[in-house]
Image (tube, rainbow, N blue to C red):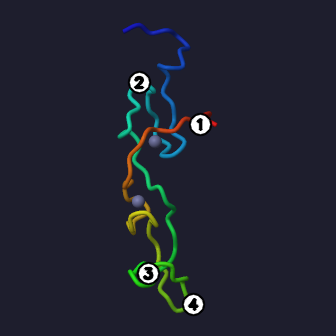
Amino acid sequence: MEKKSGSEEDKGKVCKRCKESYRASSNTSFSCRFHPSFFVCRRHDDQKRYYELGPNDPPYAAKFYDCCGAEDPEASGCTTSFHVLYDDD
Ligand SMILES: [Zn+2]
Ligand SMILES: [Zn+2]
């Protein structure tokens, strides 16, 4: 393996989406784990998926990822894809 100093390919990059550092050479469609939707604050029983949090609702009743329903903000992503370059767009 040759190393060219200052080569963009060989430098660690930081993913725009998951904020992890990675190397372009090892960026595969499984490298980046993330949630395609936001962590939202509303009730998530099946009938009332889009219920707005009311004044008497406990706040914990309504926090989850909109994509997969994970209630832990630290839950690992439900989707994988390529890492995203900061200067991609
Ligand atoms: Zn998710
Ligand atoms: Zn990533």
Mark 1 residue's CB less than 8 Å from ligand 2: no
Q: Which amino acid does label 3 sit on?
A: Ala
Q: Decide: few, some or many residues near mark 2? Use Cα within 10 Å; few <14, some 14-19, many ≥20.
A: few
Residue corresponding to mark 3 = 61
* Disc nearest the viewer among 4 and 1: 1
* Label 3 – label 1 distance at C-alpha: 35 Å
Give the SS element for disc 3: helix
Residue corresponding to mark 2 = 25
Q: Quadrant of the C terminus?
A: top right
* Label 3 – label 4 distance at C-alpha: 12 Å
Give percent across and percent down for residue 25.
41, 24
Give percent across and percent down for residue 46.
38, 80
Sequence-first tag of 3 and 4 = 4
Query: Residue at point 51% right, 46% down?
Result: 17
Do tag 4 and tag 1 residues touch (Cβ < 8 Å)? no
Q: Decide: few, some or many residues near mark 4? Use Cα within 10 Å; few <14, some 14-19, many ≥20.
A: few
Query: Residue at point 43% right, 51% down?
Result: 34
Q: Decide: few, some or many residues near mark 1? Use Cα within 10 Å; few <14, some 14-19, many ≥20.
A: few
Q: What residue type is labelled 1?
A: Tyr
Residue corresponding to mark 1 = 86
* Label 1 – label 2 distance at C-alpha: 16 Å
User: How many labels sit on residues?
Assistant: 4
Q: What residue type is labelled 4?
A: Pro
* Disc nearest the viewer among 4 and 2: 2
Give the SS element for disc 2: helix
Mark 2 residue's CB less than 8 Å from ligand 2: no
Give percent across and percent down for residue 19.
50, 43
Residue corresponding to mark 4 = 55
Sequence-first tag of 1 and 2 = 2
Q: Is residue 28 above or below residue 57?
A: above
